[in-house]
Amino acid sequence: MVDQPILRVENIVKTIGGNRILDDVSLTVKRGGLKVLIGPSGAGKSTLLACINFLSPPDSGAITLEGKTIDGKSKRELLALRQQVGMIFQDFNLFDHLSAMENVRVALIKVKGMDKRAATARAMEELARVGLADKPSLYPAQLSGGQKQRVSVARALALDPKVLLLDEPTSALDPELIGEVLTVIRDLADEGMTMIMATHQISFSAALADEFLFMEQGRIVERGAPSVLLAHGSGSRTQSFCAKLSELAGEATCELASPAV
């Protein structure tokens, strides 16, 4: 059972404003796996994640979770899907008028129907899990960007998702705050959380991912193990893109000497 795909994305097509944003995209994720979407801006990475949990319904294709193909027209199935497939956004999407604890608790009460006391206890548990046990009463305006993103992770985890989608989770953060969010993601990977993540944090994700999916112009044009795609002399599109990112950042190349880098 461990090796069976928990999520299948088959032949997804999405057109927005007359432009084909996704063009026949397919992927599978095994339980406990981490797929990393990389590629230039506008490649379709964020749209693909939004299509997977029907925040932006695909025009055609199929999303199958644990062997069940999701009916995008059924409100009940969509509600169930969004409980099982959590989403972490670039811009946190927190409620400004709610404290950190209340941001985590609200879905437990409204979606899962938990009573207030149980929901509060679970919210506190998840805040502790992401290192924010001492910040439950603070509002988003009182939190750093990294703390806000960790609250959003805690909120998603509180619903016990089977798959977690992360859309550039560090892109809105100052450089010194990125590490605290990456630490949480690494911990989730170590715990066996199934994830699909769009990111430009290539070296970090290479150490965790079982597969890189390089997207360009709405298609997956290259896929493979990070150690293969980033190997010195591979000539891969992924390695070329990574080298450009490193050059822009003024860093050394992110070629991998070994899968453990």
Image (cartoon, rainbow, N blue to C red):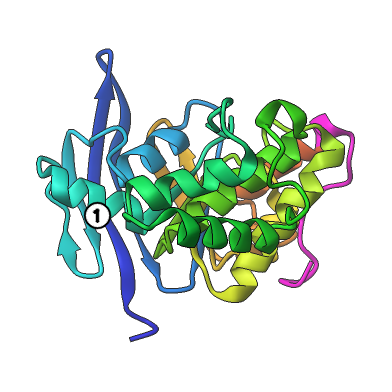
Residue at the location (61% across, 64% down)? 125
Residue closest to the eye, 85 or 35: 85
Range drawn in magenta: 247-261
Image point (41%, 61%), residue name: 161
Magenta run includes residue 153: no
How far across and how far down the image is residue 91, in percent? 58, 30
- Quadrant where the C terminus sits is bottom right
From the top left corner, tell me how far across and down residue 162 is, in percent.
39, 65
Asked if the stretch drawn in magenta spans residue 254, the answer is yes
Residue at the bottom extreme, as displayed: 1
Residue 82 appearing in the image: yes
Image-quadrant location for residue 208: bottom right
Q: Nearer the viewer, residue 190 or 21?
A: 190
State the image coordinates of residue 44 (x, y, percent, origin top left): 42, 33
* 161 is higher (above) or lower (below) than 134: below
Q: Residue at x 73, y 42 (%)?
A: 147
- The quadrant the N terminus occupies is bottom left
Q: Secondary structure at mark 1?
A: helix
Q: Amino acid at mark 1?
A: Ala
User: Mark 1 Cα within 10 Å, few/some/many (few <14, many 20+)?
Assistant: few
76 w.r.t. 139: above or below: below
Name the residue that disc number 1 marks: 80
Assign the magenta stretch its main secondary structure.
loop
Q: Residue at x 54, y 74 (%)?
A: 192
Q: Is 258 situated above or below 143?
A: below
Q: Is 100 or 5 nearer to us in this picture?
A: 100
Q: Quadrant of residue 40?
A: top right
User: Is residue 237 visible in the rendered structure shown here?
Assistant: no
Horizontally, is 202 left or right of 167 in the view?
Answer: right
Closer-to-camera residue (63/246): 63
Residue 58: percent from the left, percent from the top?
22, 36
